Image (cartoon, rainbow, N blue to C red):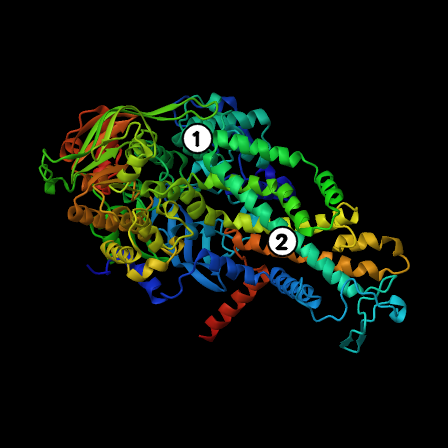
Amino acid sequence: MTNINPGAETAFKLAANETQSKSLGKIVWGRFVRHKAAMISAVVLTITILVVLTSIGVGPIPGWWIWSPTDIDPTIVNNGHPTFTWNGIIPSFGEHPFGQDQIGRDVFARTMRGGQVSLMVMVLMGIIATFVGVIIGAYSGFYRGRMDFVLQRGTEVVIAIPTIVVTAVIGHKFGGQNPALFGIVLGLLLWPGLTRLVRAEYLSLREREFVDAARVAGASDRSIMFRHILPNAMGVIIVNATLLMATATILEAALSFLGFGIQPPNVSLGQLINEYQTSFSTRPWLFWWPGLFIIIYALTINLIGDGLRDAFDPRQRRIPKTKELKQQAIEKTETEVAQ
Amino acid sequence: MSPAKKKPDAAANEAREVTTASGPAESEAIEVIPGEVTPDAVPEAGEVPVIGASHAVEVGDVVLDVTDLNVDFYVDGVWVPAAIDVNYEVKAGEVVAIVGESGSGKTQSSMSIIGLLPRNGRASGSAKLRGRELVGLPQRKLTSVRGPEVGVIFQEPMTAMNPVLTVGYQIVEVLREHTALRPEEAKERAIELLRLVEIPEPERRFDSYPHQLSGGQRQRAMIAQALACDPALLFADEPTTALDVTVQAEILDLIRDLKTRINAGIVLITHDMGVVADMSDRIIVMKDGRIVEEGDSKDIFTKPQHEYTKALLSAVPHLGSTLATKDPNRVSKNATPVLEAKGLVVEYPKQGRQPAFRAVRGIDLVIREGEIVSLVGESGSGKTTVGRAAVGLLPVAEGELTVVGKNMQGISHHDLAELRKKFSIVFQDPGSSLNPRWPIGQSIAEPMQLAGWEKGRRVTRVSELMDQVELPRNFRNRYPHELSGGQRQRVGIARALALEPTLLIADEPTSALDVSVQARVLEIFTELQREHGFGCLFVSHDLAVVEQLSDRIAVMKDGVIVEQGTTAEIIQNPKDPYTQKLIAAVPVPDPAEQERRRAEANA
């Protein structure tokens, strides 16, 4: 048998650039890369995370910064003001670039620690909420009926639990020293939104014919749910998990600011702001920096989530701007005239 | 001349709002002389109602003159041409059919004329509607053209009508937005239009929502909407593709009837040569954006000039053309049955408040080894349900269904899993039945993987299967979206044959494909069937396709088999009135034959 037949004309065209087999993942990546705000955010976030992790070190691994968050420098340099200045275009860091607090602790080191703790809460919360949300949503949407009813009523119970009350209790019981616990609790409270979305996605995907095709081929329910349907629901999941993490950053900061979250001597970005709120007029830089990092986290993650959502949405084709269209039209007529 | 013109700005604004709010179907500005719409004008049923007639065209006047029309789309930074140097004209009272495969630019070239291109499209050249240049006309001026001058009938009435508004409201809205008709006058006029398109009980249907109407009635309502403003030109974009044959025949009758009544030029965009033969006066054949042949309907059918036209015509299955080559004894009467149904009843279980629905109500059917049996019927007849019950996707409610020696009623999970290695199914829509996130190699290999084959054996078998369905082997790493419809369906077939099944269910495998692609896929399918000798249940609504393939045919209606017999018996000598009606409704790709049949029907 040969490959030559009239119907396979396109096949030949495709065979010519055979190496260009694109998975949907690659297409999504290609579209994501073109989203400028999301790409800039991704770079900024990566650099921020690198700095936050390496500067004061993680756990037993030492970092490159001379001060640790708990070190007290008895000499208050420059009255505690930030020593960071610009020498023309060359930045000069000085001894305490972010300044010092009342008792001489280095604000840079403390902000970095706060950044680490907030990052940890955010990531843990993101992973747990996504995992729980996807599993419950998948079972609920795939099996429908009684299973769906039970799971969804359960979900509503979780929605009804006030986050602030639970975290306040946890904060008091465990002293607010354990960011991991805090992240896990937030994760266990914030999955319902994702569950509803995953459930909706499964409800529509389970009616697609490839599910029947898999079933006829003999695939088990679990295989259909997680090998067939899950990759198709990945778009919704990734996008919403990212946006959820952005929310988590702000929520953690807010709770810590209210005194319900991380508590001293441990440090988180929100807790730093809470701790220094009395010196608002005398040492404003004490919240500039934690505030800046909260904004960086929340904004970059939100923008990345936004970029992902655009990249995953097949209907959102890049439509040329009217200006570009006109430009193209002019170029075309010019080449025609030239010919 | 029209009251709407007294306040041009307001009218234009309103028109724009309509366009954005409810899509192109409603974007019809209207020029009507209000005085004509009086209760006296409501015609008796059967009488010829003349509505509007505000445009002064006589039969034979050139309504649309298209010269050097080019349409391009801006895709990934380059302009991709969709239509190149298109030239044609349409006269009043004439049906011009534009024929071509999907992607040939037949729809886009027409939509560009009325300014309904997507935002990344552009048109150049000239299209004159009764002397007025339409290409390059700004949208706000086009709204006064769409409606009074040009009407459009879309392919899928369910999506082209707004599901949350009543049919009557959608017609009245059009009338009210652009004329000075009072609400009650507009309503009368809308009912009159519904009567014109032969919707029964138009007064009651006026308050129905689109989903409450049948497919055919919806299409009629949309035609009424397109005609509301009495256009000089009507674009019909695949108006019957989404409909059953018998309904299609009715709609075609209606359009042909309207052609003489409304005195408009009709542009019929379709890929169905049967419809073309039935309807058109002139034919334009398009391929890859260019017109390859143009001419009188009869000439094109009897002496096609261009190679492509010949190929297109030869790909169209003719009802009754392969009967001579059929051997009724190809499959021995004593061959073992692979599927046996006795009094089979299949129900869709009740969901919430919806009671259980009995889709198949007691049928008897036997498929022997190596035999192709076709199940034919219209949508809702339960034919697909039988196929799905046979592969265990739906439970058997009553009666007996034996598949490859196992009773399907109350079958255990374990037995069903074993059985699934022995049968498989090819689905209707290859775009939906392949997992979009899996490379096709993986999709083809899945049944083998689930049957526990080791990797090396799977890889060899996948290559072998891809050769058999004539797909290049290097396609195995491609994703479904990179393949054309025909290629995807071949992947579906390869996957279904992976484990050498003894029974194959084919659920309308070619209905989503173009004619020429369909011909090739059917050829491959037949070859493979001869080679592997599996028994096959071929579910289809297309009698011409069924006749080509099958050894026996069973005709289904409302969940019951009304007639079954060998292919020759059913096609040449149908006994049941429903079968007769079904066969009579199939459009024959031959204008002379169609004319003869029409004369016969009218006599």
Residue B93 position by quadrant: top left
Residue situated furthest front in the rendering: A60
- The foreground one among B235 and B445 is B445
Mark 2 lies on residue: A123
Left or right: where does residue A295 sit relative to residue A222?
right
Decide if residue B538 is in sight here.
yes
Relative vertical location of residue B484 with respect to residue B384 in this rendering, above or below: below
User: Distance between the Cα atoms at labels 1 and 2?
Assistant: 71 Å
Image coordinates of residue A7 in percent, x first then y, are 28, 55
- The foreground one among B531 and B382 is B531
Image coordinates of residue B229 in percent, x first then y, are 50, 36
Mark 1 lies on residue: B50
Task: Label 2: state its secondary structure.
Answer: helix
Relative vertical location of residue A253 with respect to residue A44 in this rendering, above or below: above
Decide if residue B101 is in sight here.
no
Left or right: where does residue B563 sit relative to residue B355?
left
- The foreground one among B558 and B196 is B558
Q: Nearer the viewer, mark 1 or mark 2?
A: 2
Identified at 51% across, 28% down, the residue is B168
Q: Chain of mark 1?
A: B
Name the amino acid type tagged 2.
Val
Q: Residues within 10 Å of mark 1 (few under 14, many from 20)?
A: some
Left or right: where does residue A37 sit relative to residue B400?
right
Q: Chain of mark 2?
A: A
Identified at 26% across, 56% down, the residue is B457
Name the amino acid type tagged 1.
Val
Image coordinates of residue B287 in percent, x first then y, are 33, 56
